[in-house]
Image (cartoon, grey):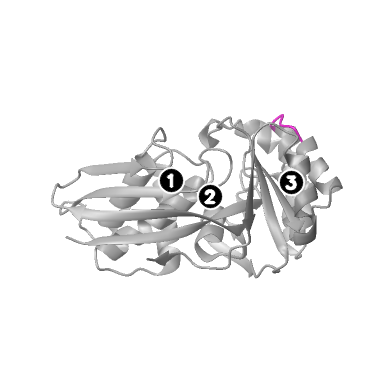
Amino acid sequence: MGKAVAVAHGAATIVNAIALGRGAAFGVDLWTKAEVKLTSEVGVFEVKITSDPTESTLLVEKTVTRVLRRFGLEKSFGAKIKTESNIPAARGLKSSSVAANATALATTTALGKTLDDLEIVKIGVEAAFDAKCTITGAFDDACASYFGGAVITDNTNRQILKQTQLPKDFAVLFHVPAKKAYTINSDVERLQTVKPLVETAFEKAMAGKLWEALTLNGLVYSAASNQNASIAIDALAAGAIAAGLCGKGPAVTAVTPNDKVDRVKAELQKYEGEVLLAHFNTEKAKVL
């Protein structure tokens, strides 16, 4: 029976796609590894999420199922899947998109098959809909996770509109509150009210002004979802070049020049929660 391990890296929001159906995100070097072992117990999926055993395993199961179905093998195999990650779940840090990417790639490889990168990403996106853990399919996050760099996407039509490399000399700080918030519980109608402002952020991103876009998007969504914008403002005041809500929150991203990391980190640590340090990721998801 086939077995494979794959890794996909994390991502952070530039423009959240909930209001527009279009979004932008960039890759960070947090990671999720998925190990998939095929079994002869058809349709039986044993999933272990080692880093957060309380999290639902449904997304991982749906991802494996979709890959098997893609090859007409859903009546041939079951699987044992183990994921390990340093990405906190349900904080806006794309843990779902990353897990789906790693799982889809590992499952495909365990079957001895290959698929086009974008097809693997799309399988994960469909699985996220199956598992009801997404509103837009998070195609932007999934692409940023899988390919690295910055991506701007049309989530509704699953198209990459633009890909950009990222500069070297920056760090990414995340302020991560202890409280979880699941995307599917977001008040979409309320988030739709700020659509014109998110449109402006999206236009900035398309024009190459990624960091202005991130900050504007973060402020707008913070206001619309009644979350504390002062965390991002304090990060900017301390020298971050961009700061704002990541996804639907509650995590906040601060893109920071390397020489300002200590100052920005100190500001973020004034708020309850943990601070994670990451860097831009430029590496594609891969089989280990």
- Find the residue positioned furthest to the left: 40
Q: What element carries label 2?
A: loop
- The residue type indicated by label 2 comes to Ala
Q: What element carries label 1?
A: helix
Q: In this view, does 143 lie above or below 277?
A: below
Q: Mark 3 or mark 2, which is nearer the start of the sequence? A: 2
- The residue type indicated by label 1 comes to Ala
Q: Does the magenta stretch include residue 104?
A: no
Q: In this view, does 77 lie to the left or right of 275?
A: left
Q: In which quarter of the image is the N terminus?
A: bottom left
Q: In which quarter of the image is the C terminus?
A: bottom left
CA neighbours of label 2 inside 10 A, class few (<14), some (14 to 19), many (20+):
many
Which secondary structure dominates the residues rendered in magenta? loop
Residue at (46% x, 39% y) in the render: 133
Q: In this view, does 90 lie to the left or right of 222?
A: left
Q: Choose mark 2 or mark 3, whichever is in front.
A: 3
- Can residue 69 be seen by looking at this rendering? no
Q: How far apart are marks 3 and 1 (CA)?
A: 33 Å
Q: Mark 1 or mark 2, which is nearer the start of the sequence? A: 1
Q: Distance between the residues labelled 2 and 3?
A: 28 Å
- Image quadrant in which you'd find residue 52: top left
Asked if the residue at tag 3 contacts the one at tag 2, i.e. Cβ–Cβ closer than 8 Å, the answer is no
- Can residue 164 be seen by looking at this rendering? yes
Q: Mark 2 points at which residue?
A: 138
Q: Name the residue under label 3.
A: 265
- The residue type indicated by label 3 comes to Lys
Which disc is residue 199 wearing?
A: none
Q: Name the residue under label 1.
A: 128
Asked if the residue at tag 1 contacts the one at tag 2, i.e. Cβ–Cβ closer than 8 Å, the answer is yes
| Stretch in magenta | 225-229
